[in-house]
Image (cartoon, helix red, strand yellow):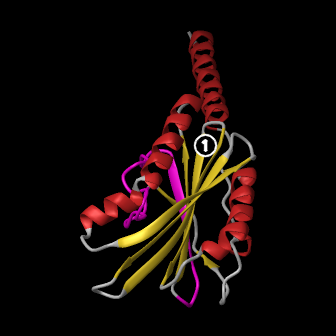
Amino acid sequence: MNAVRTAVLTAAVTGLTLASLATATAAGPAPKFLSAGQLPAASTPWVADAVQQGLPEYGSVCTEGVAPAAGTSYRDFRTDLDTNGRQTTTVAATEAKAKTLATKLKQRIAGCLDRLAVEYPGTVGEAFYHGGIAVEEGADVYNVDTSHPETGTADAHLISVGRDGRTVTVLEVSHLGWTLSEEVGPFRNSTRTAVAKLY
């Protein structure tokens, strides 16, 4: 009887061990995030918060509501002079789902200015697509600049979407007051680094 119990216990432990190994293998390594020094240079130094799991409490203006909470993590960045950044990364269940997510995010960004004009009457602005970047499965760069003449507010946003296999990362830099179009080159470099650094 003891031999039978030992055999059953050994099989159970072995099964749990194999299951744990399979789960760890399926999960794979966690994606890496940019450091503060890898963002485009600003007038004051960037500060990087710790990486957080799930979705941020306050979503990004052009991409909120697209990425799922499951499999998503993010890091916020900030400077002392009204410039903020965020990298949001989602690990999808399959590469096909990651590709679909990336497409939805890019569509959401492309229609961002039109949505803001409807949600906030009087909003005017410009939106541009700055082309793709050849890194892993590719990345695309956009900027959306908005202003509201009646309130005197203005916001500029640089946004990119990149993918490596079943992982999608969104990088955003936003500034109050003026356009960031002159930062497109450095932002493209940061985007390339963000996607290449994931794994």
Q: In percent of the image, x 35 and y 59: which residue is there?
A: 114
Residue 4, x across and y down, in percent: 58, 10
User: Mark 1 is on which residue type?
Assistant: Thr
Residue 136: quadrant of the picture: top right
Residue 94, x across and y down, in percent: 56, 30
- The residues colored magenta run 55-81
Q: According to the image, label 1 marks what residue?
A: 167
How packed is label 1: few (under 14 Cα within 10 Å), some, or many (20 or more)? many
Above or below, 158 relative to 198: below
Residue 33 visible in the current orientation: yes
Which secondary structure lies at badge 1? strand
Horizontal relation, residue 60 to residue 140: left or right: left
Q: Specify the quadrant that holds the N terminus.
A: top right
Horizontal relation, residue 92 to residue 39: left or right: left
- Magenta stretch: includes residue 156: no
- Magenta stretch: includes residue 71: yes
Residue 30 visible in the current orientation: no
Q: In percent of the image, x 53 and y 77: which residue is there?
A: 84
Q: In percent of the image, x 37 and y 67: which residue is there?
A: 58
